[in-house]
Image (spheres, grey):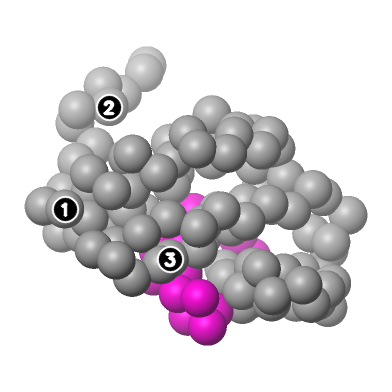
Amino acid sequence: MQTDRRALRSSDTTTALSLFLVAERGRRGARVMTLGTLDGRLVASSGGPEPSRIAAAGSLKLRGIAAPELLGDLARFPFYVTVVHDKGEPLLLTCVGGEDRAGAAEPHVDRILSQ
């Protein structure tokens, strides 16, 4: 039985972001997706293991620093980072595995954060 996406909503921003990441991770076929700050602090996530380490690895990748030790067993998968904005503050969307769908998530994250 398929769940209607409208049933999976929340007025809590962090919960709404996590629900979005669950859906987006499914669309991309990703192992893990995180949304974090540029310094690597986790804001929301879907998948695992250890999403806080994935957010930190995404922050380092954005700065040109490879950190396969943070990815552990996931280091063998493609690894993408995209900068999105929360009212001018940049946030980092990190995706491990699956497709790189650059630009696909930003409007949704912006909509959730603007509420």
Was residue 40 drawn as part of the magenta stretch in this picture? Answer: yes
* Amino acid beneath label 2: Arg
Q: Residue furthest right?
A: 76
* Amino acid beneath label 3: Leu
Circle 3 residue: 91
Q: Decide: few, some or many residues near mark 2? Use Cα within 10 Å; few <14, some 14-19, many ≥20.
A: few
* Cα separation between marks 3 and 1: 14 Å
Q: Decide: few, some or many residues near mark 3? Use Cα within 10 Å; few <14, some 14-19, many ≥20.
A: many
Circle 1 residue: 114
Circle 2 residue: 5
* Numbered range of the magenta stretch: 35-49
Q: Image height check: is 62 above or below 78?
A: below
Quadrant position of the N terminus in the picture: top left
Upstream in sequence: badge 1 or badge 2: 2
Upstream in sequence: badge 3 or badge 1: 3
Relative to 21, is 28 on the left or the right? right
Name the secondary structure under disc 3.
strand
